[in-house]
Image (cartoon, rainbow, N blue to C red):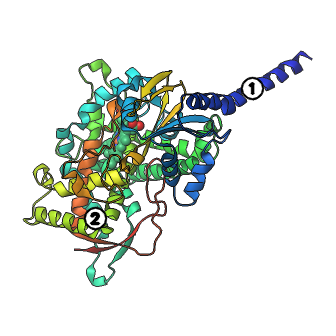
């Protein structure tokens, strides 16, 4: 009898917790927003998940956010399943969350669930508070401009050997090549980041190369599927070894074993960096800030190395894919960029810090692409404590602990409030005085640590690609923004390519 009562009570308790989690909590948070006069929409249980999904399936993934922002403005509340969310695209609020009040905000459970699937929790992307400060203090020097600049020859070599794959004998009349530049840029960015992190010698080892490449590709595909079927946001279920989780765990373990083996070999002096200065693995092995006791353990080094690869791979590949698209769809811009590249290469010049600094229009093209097709368009945070933030119109917003914040950077990038003719791809705005605001690499203490690296890499790739090849869009294809953390084209991006 007692056993039945206990089981029954337990059952009621579980039901109560579920109702509290799925219905009562989101309702309370959203009701609180309504009471403060903040616009928004409350849909019990599913929240706006179905609206997101409909927009994605209709090949207009951003239409949902665009339409909702147009309806409610620069701050409004919705929920994503059981997660109540304040959506913001107001620069003052963004600065408040990412910079001024950063101690009240952690990475959101959703962002954590996605990143931790492959990276685990002990890496710079996911550690919080003092632990993050320690990681950042040790890692910041690695990405100082002089260290990054010392990798220019390596980036040039890696890009050059990748591009030989596009160079076939012209007599074969096989041109134009028709390639999915989205895939090509993904492979090229992976070559560069793995070469710069682990060294070219290590990546020439077929076993290492295949394990890392295959594991990253399989894990990324599985994660993308788990984002779209929403399994990734469902607590407990997302930990079960089903729906790709087992495959992802295996990839994670395979990469980890290889990276630990590489660290061991580097420590024993069996391998060395192949660039003029140090590669990122060297720099990680010697990172100890002011205090030797603060050095990273091998496990941490392995996690950080993999973090650089994952954080720096698809982001840069996405930027390069959209920059090529923006060039071929804007012939005047393409021509101006091409002229600049040709003038730099005219005297058989090589790419060095000084020749790269001459590519000012190209820099503007890259910046305009970051505005127009921001690779990481939405950042997520969760409030760790009740607090109040103030919007640019002076409105005070009380945020309850546990509320998610979706920072819609792309809405701000495309808003007439901040940009002149935002729907136009117009790189020259970055050569003129402009009052636009954008944060393509985030803001505050968690701003992208690899941004110098990324901009340098993007400039080198674009300069070399334009110097050697000519591009045209394959007509008639469906070019659609995809969303899985970064905005790669959903159906790829086919281009015709000729040597110059
Ligand atoms: C165009 C290329 C890139 C873009 C658009 C980009 C964008 C971003 C953004 C927006 C953040 C902030 C995330 C947040 O606040 O939630 C970030 C963080 C980060 N990025 Fe990048 N990134 C790029 C390339 C790279 C590269 C090449 C690397 C490494 C070599 C890298 C490593 C990181 C790391 C480690 C963090 C976490 C920093 C922290 O939490 O302290 N990123 N990135």
Ligand 1 lies in which image quarter?
top left
Q: Residue at x 30, y 41 (%)?
A: 450
Please count the marks in the image: 2
Q: Nearer the viewer, mark 1 or mark 2?
A: 1
In front of the other: 229 or 279: 229
User: How crowded is the residue under tag 1: few (<14 C-alpha within 10 Å), some, or many (20+)?
Assistant: few
Q: Residue at x 24, y 68 (%)?
A: 332
In front of the other: 173 or 278: 173
With 432 as the anchor, is 320 left or right in this view?
right
With 347 as the anchor, is 166 left or right in this view?
right
In front of the other: 163 or 388: 388
Q: Earlier in the sequence, mark 1 or mark 2?
A: 1
Image coords of residue 462 (percent x, y): 25, 59
Where does the C terminus fall, quadrant-wise? bottom left
Q: Secondary structure at mark 1?
A: helix
Q: CA distance from mark 1 to mark 2?
A: 59 Å
In front of the other: 274 or 69: 69
Quadrant housing residue 449: top left
Are dots 1 and 2 in contact, CB under 8 Å?
no
Q: Which mark is residue 233?
A: none
Taking 347 as reference, is 312 above or below it? Answer: above
Q: Residue at x 14, y 66 (%)?
A: 342
Image coords of residue 1 (percent x, y): 92, 17
Q: Residue furthest right?
A: 1
Image coords of residue 26 (percent x, y): 62, 32
The residue indicated by pointer 1 is 16
Q: Residue furthest left?
A: 347
The residue indicated by pointer 2 is 163
């Amino acid at each position: 009898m007692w056993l039945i009562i206990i089981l029954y009570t337990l059952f009621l308790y579980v039901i109560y917790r579920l109702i509290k989690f799925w219905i009562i909590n989101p309702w309370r948070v959203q009701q609180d927003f309504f009471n403060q006069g903040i616009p928004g929409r409350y849909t019990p249980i599913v929240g706006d998940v179905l609206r997101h999904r409909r927009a994605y399936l209709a090949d207009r993934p951003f239409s949902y956010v665009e339409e909702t922002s147009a309806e409610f403005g620069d701050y409004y509340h919705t929920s994503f399943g059981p997660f109540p969310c304040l959506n913001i695209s107001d620069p003052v609020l963004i600065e408040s969350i990412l910079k001024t009040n950063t101690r009240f905000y952690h990475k959101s459970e959703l962002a954590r669930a996605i990143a931790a699937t492959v990276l685990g929790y002990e890496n710079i992307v996911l550690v919080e508070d003092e632990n993050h400060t320690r990681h950042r203090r040790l890692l910041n020097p690695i990405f100082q401009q002089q260290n990054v600049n010392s990798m220019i020859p390596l980036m040039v070599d890696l890009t050059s050997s990748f591009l030989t794959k596009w160079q076939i004998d012209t007599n074969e009349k096989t041109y134009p090549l028709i390639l999915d530049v989205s895939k090509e840029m993904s492979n090229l960015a992976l070559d560069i980041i793995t070469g710069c992190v682990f060294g070219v010698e290590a990546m020439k080892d077929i076993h290492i190369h295949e394990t890392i490449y295959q594991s990253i590709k399989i894990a990324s595909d599985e994660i993308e599927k788990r984002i779209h079927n929403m399994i990734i946001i469902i607590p407990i279920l997302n930990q079960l070894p089903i729906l790709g989780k087992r495959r992802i765990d295996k990839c994670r373990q395979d990469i980890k074993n290889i990276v630990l083996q590489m660290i061991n070999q580097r420590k024993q002096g069996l391998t060395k960096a192949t660039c003029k200065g140090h590669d990122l693995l060297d720099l990680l092995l010697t990172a100890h800030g002011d205090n030797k006791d603060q050095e990273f353990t091998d496990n941490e080094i392995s996690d950080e190395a993999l973090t650089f690869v994952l954080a720096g791979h698809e982001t840069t590949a996405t930027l390069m894919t959209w920059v090529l698209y923006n060039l071929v769809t804007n012939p005047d811009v393409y021509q101006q960029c091409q002229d600049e590249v040709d003038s730099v290469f005219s005297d058989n010049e090589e790419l060095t810090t000084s020749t790269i600094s001459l590519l000012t229009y190209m820099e503007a093209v890259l910046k305009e692409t970051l505005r127009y097709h921001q690779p990481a368009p939405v950042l997520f945070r969760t409030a760790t404590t009740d607090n109040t933030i103030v919007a640019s119109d002076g409105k005070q917003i009380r945020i309850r602990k546990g509320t998610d914040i979706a920072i819609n950077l792309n809405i701000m990038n495309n808003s007439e409030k901040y940009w002149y003719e935002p729907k136009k791809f117009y790189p020259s705005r970055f050569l003129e005085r402009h009052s636009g605001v954008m944060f393509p690499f985030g803001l505050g203490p968690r701003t992208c640590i690899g941004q110098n690296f990324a901009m340098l890499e993007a400039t080198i790739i674009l300069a070399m690609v334009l110097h050697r090849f000519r591009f045209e869009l394959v007509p008639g294809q469906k070019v659609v923004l995809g969303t899985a953390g970064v905005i790669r084209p959903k159906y790829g991006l086919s281009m015709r390519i000729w040597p110059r």
